[in-house]
Amino acid sequence: MTELMLDGARLQGEMPEAEWVGTMRETSLGTPPDEVRRRFATEAYICVPGFFSEEDVVAVRRSVFDTLATTGEIRGAPEEGIYTGSSQRRECIDNLDQFWRDISEDWALRRVTHSRALHEFCDILLEEPSIAHDFVFLRVSNYGRKTLVHSDHGFFTRSTDNVITAWIAFGEIPLQMGPLFILENSHKHPRVQESIRDFDVARDSDRKASWSETPLEIARQFSCRVLTRHMRPGDLVVFGMKILHGSLDNVDPDQHIRLTCDVRYQAGSESRDPRYFGPNPGGTMGQGYGELVGAIPLDEAWHIR
């Protein structure tokens, strides 16, 4: 179990309080499938340290950061992922949609997100052969970035509820760099159940998937904990569509970028949402890879869904 080092960490600007923060339970690669399914059914997440190899992680970091170095966003050795504090992406790139699509479809990344090992693990969780969405969500989170509290239900369950999210850490992510968090057992809370009923992010434009409260405010309201951990290269967290989650703030003083990716897997027998499948998927809002926060230059604000 990785010890939580809360000093210097922030949750939407708030200092984490030990009473309301806990460590994700780790599940080893050798855990029997029945126990993996039991934990997932109860807790709605599974955290597997070191699921992917260091070699694969390094290849992804080099691919992504080498490209971002050409737009003036990375200084020093590209694989270190250190932000310059500025960006020339709009000046250098004519089409940000194609730019981010090329990065997201690079073979180094796809050999991880669509690997046989991850397919087989998702087969266990879904209890049948799985299929991965073609559309992936690669994120480069520099200083000041964070992902607000939300669930994935309103984004990915238009065609089937039998979908799960696989979140992958492509580098060392201590708490000060903004790793993923899960709000413990939040998928069981009546308020969460009500918030996702008949909600579709793309259709219901008058509503937001992101919650207005901070993670600590919700933890106090729900009497639960914010579960997180110091993520290491190749760590995998798989979680369900209903559980609330987000990220800590990246407040790393040395300007290291948090590099992660999430990809959805679903039961292969279920109907497929055309927004996320095919050679040219449109994504949630139908605008392709250009609609993702990853496509936005690192010196510009993220949008909120």
Image (cartoon, rainbow, N blue to C red):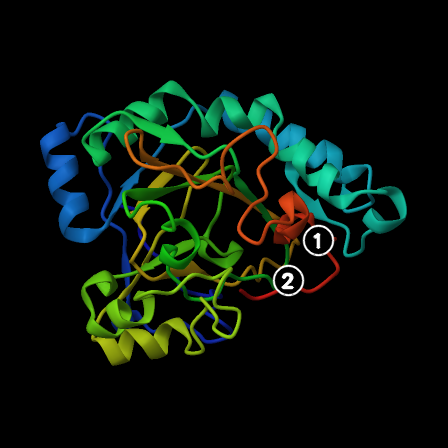
Q: Residue at x 53, y 26 (%)?
A: 110
Is 129 left or right of 141, judged from the image as shown? left
The residue that mark 1 highlights is 296
Q: Is residue 292 above or below residue 31?
A: below
Checking the image for residue 247, the label placed there is none
Between discs 1 and 2, the one toward the N terminus: 1
Q: 29 or 15: which is nearer to us?
A: 29
* Neighbourhood count class around disc 2 (C-alpha, 10 Å): few under 14, some 14–19, many 20 upward: some
The residue that mark 2 highlights is 302
Is 240 left or right of 71, judged from the image as shown? left
Q: Position of residue 289 (x, y in %)?
A: 64, 43
Is 182 left or right of 211, judged from the image as shown? left
The answer to which image quadrant residue 11 occupies is bottom left
Amino acid carrying label 1: it is: Ile
Q: Which type of secondary structure does the marked residue at label 2 adopt?
A: loop
Q: Which type of secondary structure does the marked residue at label 1 adopt?
A: loop
Residue 256 in view: no
- For the N terminus, give its image quadrant: top left
Q: Is residue 1 above or below residue 16?
A: above
Q: Position of residue 23 (x, y in %)?
A: 28, 55
Q: Position of residue 162 (x, y in %)?
A: 27, 43
Residue 17 in view: yes
Q: Residue at x 49, y 56 (%)?
A: 178
Amino acid carrying label 2: it is: Trp
Distance from Cα at disc 1 to Cα at disc 2: 7 Å
Q: Position of residue 167 (x, y in %)?
A: 41, 42
Q: Is residue 21 above or below residue 90?
A: below
Is 122 left or right of 254, judged from the image as shown? left
Q: Are dots 1 and 2 in contact, CB under 8 Å?
A: yes
Q: 235 or 200: which is nearer to us?
A: 200
The answer to which image quadrant residue 20 occupies is bottom left
